Image (cartoon, rainbow, N blue to C red):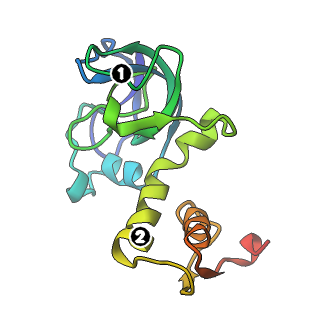
Amino acid sequence: MRAAVLTAYNVPLQLTEIPDPVPGPGDVLVRVMAGGVNPLDTKIRRGEAAHAQTAPPAVLGIDMAGVVEEVGSEVDRFRVGDEVFGMIGGVGGLPGSLAEFAAVDARLIARKPDALTMEQAAALPLGFITSWEGLVDRANVGPGQQVLIHGGAGGVGYLAVQLALARGAQVFATGSPSSQE
C-alpha cells in the first residue's frame, strides 16, 4: 500500500510503498478515506514532540475516517462496510492515518455519524478530545457557568464552544476579525 512516511525529521514526508497492515484479534482493518493533520503531527515531523515521540521511519497521522475492510476475531462492535472514525495512532510507534489502510485497535474508533462526510469526521477526534479534557475532565463545566474560549473558530475552539453549550454553559469566544461571523 502507499503511505506518507516520515523518513527523517524536518524533511517532507515521502510517498512510499509499504506492506499492508495485518489486523490482530482486537483490531479492524480500515481503508482510510480521510486523515486529519494536526499541529501535533507537524511537531512530530519536526522531531519536537517529546511527549509523543515517534522515531523514523513512521507513518504519521493521528485522526482518520474510513471504511472497515476486515474485522479481527475478538471484535464484535464493527462489521465489514461500517464507516468509522477516531484517533488511531501516529504517535508512540503506532502507525497512523497517512496511509491507504490502517490496522486499528477497535477501542480507538467509533461509527461515523451519517451526517458527516469522511473529511469532517477525520477533522474531529484530537480537537474534540482536547476540548473534552479541558472543559469536562479538568473544569467540569456545567449549567449556569460562564466560559470564555479564545480562538472560538479554530480547530479546537469551535468544538469547545459546542461542547460548553451542550453542557449548559453560557459561552463567550474570541477570534480574529475574519472569524467573527
Viewer-proximal residue, 10 or 110?
110
Residue 100 in percent (x, y) is at 46, 20
Q: Amino acid at mark 1?
A: Asp
Residue 66 in percent (x, y) is at 52, 26
Q: Is residue 164 above or below residue 55?
A: below
Local packing at callout 2 (Cα closer than 10 Å; few below 14, some 14-19, many 20+) is some
Q: Is residue 33 above or below residue 123?
A: above
Q: How many marks are shown on the rendered structure?
A: 2
Residue at 43% across, 64% down: 132
Local packing at callout 1 (Cα closer than 10 Å; few below 14, some 14-19, many 20+) is few
Quadrant of the snapshot with the N terminus: top left
Q: Is residue 127 above or below residue 68?
A: below
Label 1 and label 2: CA atoms lie apart by: 29 Å
Cβ atoms under marks 1 and 2 closer than 8 Å: no
Residue at 34% across, 46% down: 45
Quarter-of-image position of residue 154 = bottom right
Circle 2 SS class: helix
Name the mark on residue 136.
2
Q: Is residue 102 visible?
A: yes
Residue at 54% across, 40% down: 122
Q: Which residue, given by chain and number where applicable, does mark 1 sit on?
A: 76
Q: Amino acid at mark 2?
A: Val
Q: Is residue 88 visible?
A: no
